[in-house]
Image (spheres, rainbow, N blue to C red):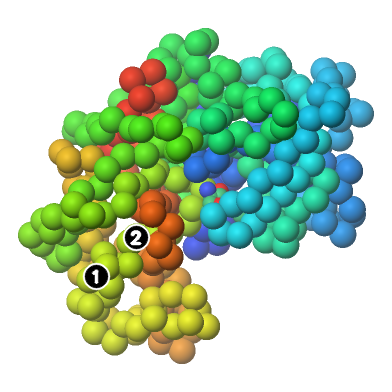
């Protein structure tokens, strides 16, 4: 079987939200290849937290079964966090159903989630080695559905400022052109992780070997591209007027600045290049713009988020444990 759903951008393409049905209840979730928990706003949240969100009410689902005693607690790379209880229910995405999916019900959330009222929760598409359910971690939607899919894959075709697509079980030839450039992934840390041993700056920029560069992860739930400090410093050294602005939390530059192209190695065989203009992430006003490339604050991993992914067709191959990028159709 195969399934397909829309991926709708929030402001600045900061995240993408997709329709999911849980126990017959429609919710809008943020599909996140950088985590492995499926959690939803639930009616057990204080109304001050759930105001503006759609909440899942297990008592209204005829197929929900509590997982008594199980709990979960997650802390994300951006400092957000959530905790709660667990049950099992039927989860359908684009016509594809897992009958007995672990569904995590939030009963406590950090502010960023509360304020993000279009977002009713997250659907983790990472590897369940990092699922936070205790005392027994549970599988992701993709891991559960994989054996039933025509192909053990899902693809992300996110768009810049437009509605895109997640597809499960097929690599839709209508969505890309030319070859898909694959790299093997190492899932041992729970991510779609691969080496990124070089980068390029400028059109026809020479490839700069970076043997000490941190490995990269493909993370649909991260807005920006977060790079090792020396890489991001090398880029903005080529942008006149660029500076690190503590109050804005990163590199800013004059909106009129000329931005060089930037390419990152996807494994050792392919460099994904972003045009300079695609590096302008947000106009902060007053002629100051915020960059889509920022520091990973020494996290030891480079995070290739939506600023990169929205310019490519991305293949997450759970069968062959590989990640691939292609040009969009
Ligand atoms: N994988 C990512 C995850 O999806 C988000 S969680 C999130 C927080 C607030 C609003 C929306 C989502 C967080 O930022 C980077 C990393 O952690």
> How far, Cα to Cα, is label 1 from label 2?
10 Å
Q: Residue at x 49, y 53 (%)?
A: 222
Figure check: 276 above or below 32: below
Element under disc 1: helix
- Compared across the picture, whether 211 is left or right of 245 comes to left
Quadrant of the image occupied by residue 300: bottom left
Q: Where's residue 139, x and y in %?
A: 60, 24
Can the viewer see residue 26 in this picture?
A: no
Q: Nearer the viewer, mark 1 or mark 2?
A: 2
Can the viewer see residue 53 in this picture?
A: yes
- Compared across the picture, whether 20 is left or right of 288 comes to right
Figure check: 241 above or below 115: below
- Compared across the picture, whether 151 is left or right of 28 comes to left
Q: Residue at x 72, y 49 (%)?
A: 82
Q: In this orientation, which residue lies closer to the viewer: 318 or 13?
A: 318
Q: Which residue is mark 2?
A: 227
Q: Residue at x 21, y 63 (%)?
A: 261
Label disc, if present, on residue 235 of the rendered structure: 1
Label disc, if present, on residue 146 of the rendered structure: none
Q: Where's residue 180, x and y in %?
A: 24, 32
- Compared across the picture, whether 201 is left or right of 299 comes to left
Q: In this orientation, which residue lies closer to the viewer: 187 or 146?
A: 187
Figure check: 245 above or below 1: below
Quadrant of the image occupied by residue 277: bottom left
Contact, CB < 8 Å: mark 1 with mark 2? Answer: yes
């Amino acid at each position: 079987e195969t399934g397909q759903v829309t991926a709708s951008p929030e402001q600045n393409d900061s995240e993408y939200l997709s329709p999911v049905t849980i126990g017959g209840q429609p919710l809008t979730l943020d599909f996140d290849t950088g985590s492995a928990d499926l959690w939803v706003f639930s009616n057990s949240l204080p109304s001050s937290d759930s105001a503006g969100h759609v909440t899942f009410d297990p008592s209204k689902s005829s197929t929900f079964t509590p997982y008594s005693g199980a709990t979960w607690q997650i802390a994300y790379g951006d400092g957000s966090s959530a905790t709660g209880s667990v049950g099992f229910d039927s989860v359908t995405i684009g016509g594809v159903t897992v009958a007995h999916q672990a569904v995590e019900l939030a009963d406590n959330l950090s502010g960023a989630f509360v304020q993000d009222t279009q977002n009713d929760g997250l659907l983790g598409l990472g590897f369940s080695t990092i699922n936070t359910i205790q005392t027994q971690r549970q599988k992701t939607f993709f891991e559960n559905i994989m054996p039933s899919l025509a192909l053990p894959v899902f693809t992300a075709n996110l768009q810049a400022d437009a509605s895109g697509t997640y597809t499960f079980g097929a690599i839709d030839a209508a969505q890309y052109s030319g070859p898909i450039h694959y790299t093997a992934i190492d899932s041992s840390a729970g991510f779609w992780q691969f080496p990124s041993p070089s980068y390029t700056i400028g059109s026809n920029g020479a490839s700069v070997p970076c043997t000490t560069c941190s490995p990269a992860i493909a993370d649909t739930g991260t807005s920006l591209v977060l790079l090792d400090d020396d890489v991001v410093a090398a880029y903005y050294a080529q942008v006149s007027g660029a500076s690190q602005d503590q109050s804005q939390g990163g590199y800013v530059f004059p909106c009129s600045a000329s931005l060089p192209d930037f390419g990152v190695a996807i494994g050792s065989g392919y460099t994904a290049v972003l045009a300079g203009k695609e590096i302008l992430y947000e106009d902060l006003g007053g002629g100051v713009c915020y960059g889509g490339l920022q520091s990973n604050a020494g996290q030891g991993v480079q995070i290739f988020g939506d600023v990169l992914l929205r310019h490519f067709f991305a293949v997450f191959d759970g069968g062959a444990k590989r990640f691939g990028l292609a040009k969009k159709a």
